[in-house]
Every structure is written in structure tokens, then in C-alpha cells.
Amino acid sequence: MKELIHAGLARARAEGKHLGRRRTPGATDAAILTLREQGLGILKIGRKLRCGTARVQATLRAALLMIAHAESGYPTAVQVPSGLRQAVPRAVCGCPSI
């Protein structure tokens, strides 16, 4: 049974089919950050973009990590939006040490 499942998955990959959960467009991340800069809360952002609050929190947490990485002096390939430092409260990530 296990071999049949693995064979089917291998065939699907070979055909170029997407396996797993449907991905959210990358534009949603940019929209989340833009709406947060405008002062909207997590619930309102989720409702407006029709995505879950976990997605909003994960995006904001990733933005905080980008900010922390940029402030540490290490070069980063990702540009941090100008107003994001004030728009994303550090309490969102649940770790105030960042």
C-alpha cells in the first residue's frame, strides 16, 4: 500500500502537479503590511483580505524578523517598508526580546 502511494506521488511530481495546500498569493503579504501601516488591526486585516488571522500574524512576525535582521547590521536582500517599524508592534510576535 505504501509503495502505491509513493509511486502515485512520484508520478504527480514528475507531471509537475502541485502537491499540498494551495498557496496564498505573495501580493497578500504586501497587502497585509500595507494595511498594518495604515493602522488596521489583525482581525480587520484578515476580514478585509479574506484570509485567516494566523496568516496575518505570521506575515507580521516575519516582518519583525526582517526588521531585527536589518537592524543587526547583516545584509539582507529584502527591503523593509519605511513605515513598517512603527506599524508593526513588537508584541505581535509574542517575543519582546526582538
Image (tube, rainbow, N blue to C red):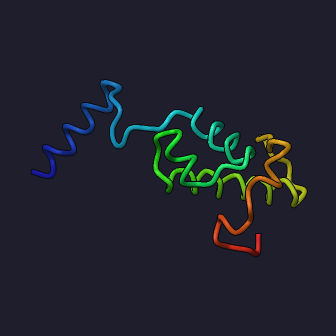
Q: Image quadrant of residue 57?
A: bottom right
Please state if 74 lies on the left or on the right of 4 as rendered.
right
Residue that protrudes farthest toward the left in the picture: 1
Figure label count? 0
Residue at (59% x, 32% y) in the render: 27
Compared with 34, 92 (above or below) is: below
* 16 horizontally vs 58: left or right: left
Q: Residue at x 63, y 37 (%)?
A: 31
Which image quadrant for residue 91? Answer: bottom right
Q: Residue at x 50, y 54 (%)?
A: 53
The picture places residue 32, in percent across and down from the top left corner, at 62, 43
Q: Is residue 63 left or right of residue 80?
A: left
- Comparing 70 with 61, the one in front is 61
Residue positioned 84% across, 53% down in the render: 70
Residue farthest along the right direction in this orientation? 73
> Quarter-wise, where is residue 61 in the image?
bottom right
Closer to us: 44 or 87: 44
- Residue 71: horizontal and vertical position, in percent? 87, 58
Quadrant occupied by the C terminus: bottom right
Q: Work out whether 63 lies above or below 94.
A: above
Q: Where residue 36 sits: x, y (%)? A: 69, 48
